[in-house]
Structure formats: structure tokens, C-alpha cells
Image (cartoon, rainbow, N blue to C red):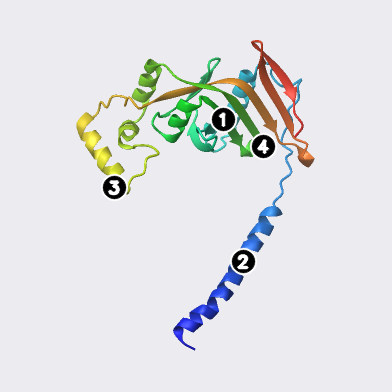
Amino acid sequence: MTERSAACWLTPLRMARHNERMNATHSSIADLRKSYERAELSEDASHADPLQQFDQWLNEALAAQVPEPNAMTVATVDGSLRPSTRIVLIKGYDARGIVWYTNYDSRKGRELAGNPFAALQFHWVELERVVRIEGLVEKVDAADSDAYYASRPLDSRIGAWASPQSQVIPGRSVLVANAAKYGAQFLLQPPRPPHWGGYRLVPDRWEFWQGRKSRLHDRLRYRLESGAWLRERLAP
């Protein structure tokens, strides 16, 4: 048997083994199960104000030392209605909304410029909890962006200049070269880049999800109606 014919003979065998492994993986994923039994979320025990409920749950996530309790997913939609998500870190919250910082020229920045509505999600796996937040997004005041930028480590401040976020680059060497360039240019006092700053999502909907046994999860939604929060229970 020639080398070429042996390779042709092995290809179907390799494909069969690959398919077997894939089928086994799919089967094992489909069989994954978890019973959620840590806590419950009732109307009587929850806050009437969703911000207070969020504050309680976030502080409980911090106290439980779950990995990166400040990590949240941001979902945006572009002009063709194509959604996209990414993970960012919450940097502040109050009655005005939820704040994070990023590059305004990134994909999310461009999408928010075209469609200012977005959704956030926190998933605290260890506590079997999810928080979903929807609303209109606005840029924070320049003074707030300046203050937060100044509080960041020097390498992070230089990084905001060095990375043309979401743009195609030929290799990592571009980032390294840019970091060296701006580090030499600004030394220890880089100013905030004009393309970098904060966003604030102003919520008009919140949802708090607590895992429960038998998939009968607790879901409480808060909707803003005529300036007041309406609390509703959703079927899981």
C-alpha cells in the first residue's frame, strides 16, 4: 500500500473516531444536571426598590468571595439588529444607574452610538443567582471619567492609549510598540484619551433570578411605570 493510499484509508477511520468523541461529548453535556437549593427569593423578603435588592445581592456576592463578583455581561445591538456581548467590570452604581468604563471607539461604543439601549447581566454561580438589567445608556460626565482614569494603575492608563480596541491589528507587537510609544511620550502623567471614558446604563427593567429545586426558579422583575417600580413574578 502506498503512502497516499494509506492516508486515504485512514481518513474515514479518523473521521469516525472524531464523530464518536463528539457524540460522547454531546451526550455528557446533555446529561449535566444541578439541583439549585441554596436560597429562595420571595416578594415578602425582597426590597421594593430594585437598586436596594441589587445592593444586597452584590454585597452578599462580595462577602461570599465569589470569583469576580463585579464582572458583568454587556449586550448591545448594531444597525443590522445583530447582537453582541462582552464582559466588563462594574465601576459604580447609584440611583442614576450602573457605570463602567471603556473605549468609545470599540465595537460596543460604536453600537451604543447607533442604538443607545443595552442589557447587563451578572451571574454569581456559587450563589445560584442572576441579575439582568435593561435600559438606556449615556456617557458619564467628563469629570467623572477623568477622576476614574486618574485612579487607574499607570500601565492601565497607558493601555487605554495603546489599544485601538476592536480594530484588526497584524500582531501583538503593535500593542507593545504603542505602549512603549505612549509611555515615552507621557511618562508618569498620561491624560485621559478622548476616545476613552464611562458609560451609565439607566435602568427601566431589572430581573432577579434565584435558582430553586426542580427548575421552579424564583424570578422577580421590576418595571418602571409612571416613575414607580412595579414588581412582578415571572414563571421560570
Of residues 162 and 69, which is closer to you in this image? 162
Mark 3–mark 4 distance (CA, rounded to whole Å): 41 Å
Secondary structure beneath dot 2 equals helix
Rendered image: mark on residue 120 = 1
Secondary structure beneath dot 4 equals loop
Secondary structure beneath dot 3 equals helix
Residue 169 at least partly seen: yes
Q: Residue furthest front?
A: 80
Mark 2 lies on residue: 19
Nearest to viewer (mark 4 / mark 2): 2
What residue is drawn where x is 39% and y is 22%? 148
Residue 183 in picture, x, y percent from top left: 24, 34
Decide which of tag 4 and tag 2 comes sooner along the chain: 2
Decide which of tag 3 and tag 4 comes sooner along the chain: 4
Residue 85 in picture, x, y percent from top left: 52, 37
Nearest to viewer (mark 1 / mark 4): 1
Q: Residue furthest top?
A: 227
CB under 8 Å between callouts 1 and 3?
no
Secondary structure beneath dot 1 equals strand
Q: Amino acid at mark 2?
A: Asn
Rendered image: mark on residue 173 = 3
The 10 Å Cα crowd at callout 1, few under 14, some 14 to 19, many 20 or more, is many
The 10 Å Cα crowd at callout 3, few under 14, some 14 to 19, many 20 or more, is few
Mark 1–mark 4 distance (CA, rounded to whole Å): 17 Å
Residue 105 lies in what quarter of the image? top left
State left or right for residue 228 relative to residue 173.
Answer: right
Residue 187 at least partly seen: no
Decide which of tag 1 and tag 3 comes sooner along the chain: 1
Decide which of tag 3 and tag 2 comes sooner along the chain: 2
Mark 4 lies on residue: 128
Q: Residue furthest left?
A: 184
The 10 Å Cα crowd at callout 2, few under 14, some 14 to 19, many 20 or more, is few
